[in-house]
Image (tube, grey):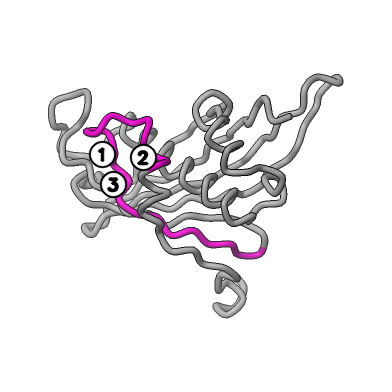
Amino acid sequence: MTAQTELAPAEVHPSDPALLAQVLRPYKDHCKYLLSADVSLTSGRASASAEFAIPESCYIDDTGHLNAVEVNICYNQMMYYLVAKSVEQGLLAEFKSWTMEDYWRHQLPDILIARFNSNFRTPINPRSFSGEMEFVSVTRRAPGGRKPFLVAETSYRYRDADGGRCDGEATLAFVNIT
């Protein structure tokens, strides 16, 4: 493990309520779970630290804990915000050519979850919890001369004040990028 000073973020971008509202615009009002997210760039890796609240599940009676569907919705919201902030601030080389107009055009149809894995360690209170995600790697691919796309490997974790924990990995595909 490296020294704490080496882990300090090179750049920190506090949560932007206006950008967050735009990112969450496609969601139904009762499904806007992301309350805030700070974005950091450390050693070339963009990450987000977020706060969430799910007052009531959007699809099922109260289970009393964060469930797999809600984990995925929260991941989507945190990921969309992290990508939007990365584009806005020019944080990742793979998105440096994108404008915010490009991001809004790509947000729903062209950012795909190719693989999603969750590990529930202990139940999380959905009423108030925090989350983090990180871009582990982003690579450009054009197999067999086909249209290029980006593949992003990400990791994420959620926790609550009572020791609830969930973590996982997701692979994203950014298609129609040219």
Query: Percent from the top left, x then y, of residue 115?
Result: 54, 29
The mark that comes first in sequence, 2 or 3, is 2
Query: Percent from the top left, x then y, of residue 71?
Result: 35, 37
Kindly check if marks 1 and 3 are in contact, taking CB atoms under 8 A apart as contact: no
Res. 42 image quadrant: bottom right
* Residue type at tag 1: Leu
Residue at 49% x, 63% y is: 13
Specify the quadrant that holds the C terminus. Answer: top right
Is 85 on the left or on the right of 37, as rendered?
Answer: right
Residue at 46% x, 46% y is: 81
* Residue type at tag 2: Cys
**Residue at the limit of the structure toward the right, as seen here:** 145
Query: Percent from the top left, x then y, of residue 124?
Result: 25, 46
**Residue 74 badge:** 2
Compared with 115, 131 (above or below) is below
Q: Secondary structure at mark 3?
A: strand
The mark that comes first in sequence, 1 or 3, is 1
Instruction: Give the extent of the magenta segment.
Output: 22-43
Q: Nearer the viewer, residue 43 or 92?
A: 92
Q: Nearer the viewer, residue 161 or 37?
A: 37
**Mark 1 crowdedness (10 Å alpha carbons): few <14, some 14-19, many ≥20:** many
Q: Nearer the viewer, residue 25 or 123?
A: 25
Nearer the observer: mark 2 or 3; the answer is 2
Compared with 12, 34 (above or below) is above
The Cα atoms of the two marked residues, 2 and 1, are separated by 10 Å
- State the residue position of label 1: 66
Nearer the observer: mark 1 or 3; the answer is 1
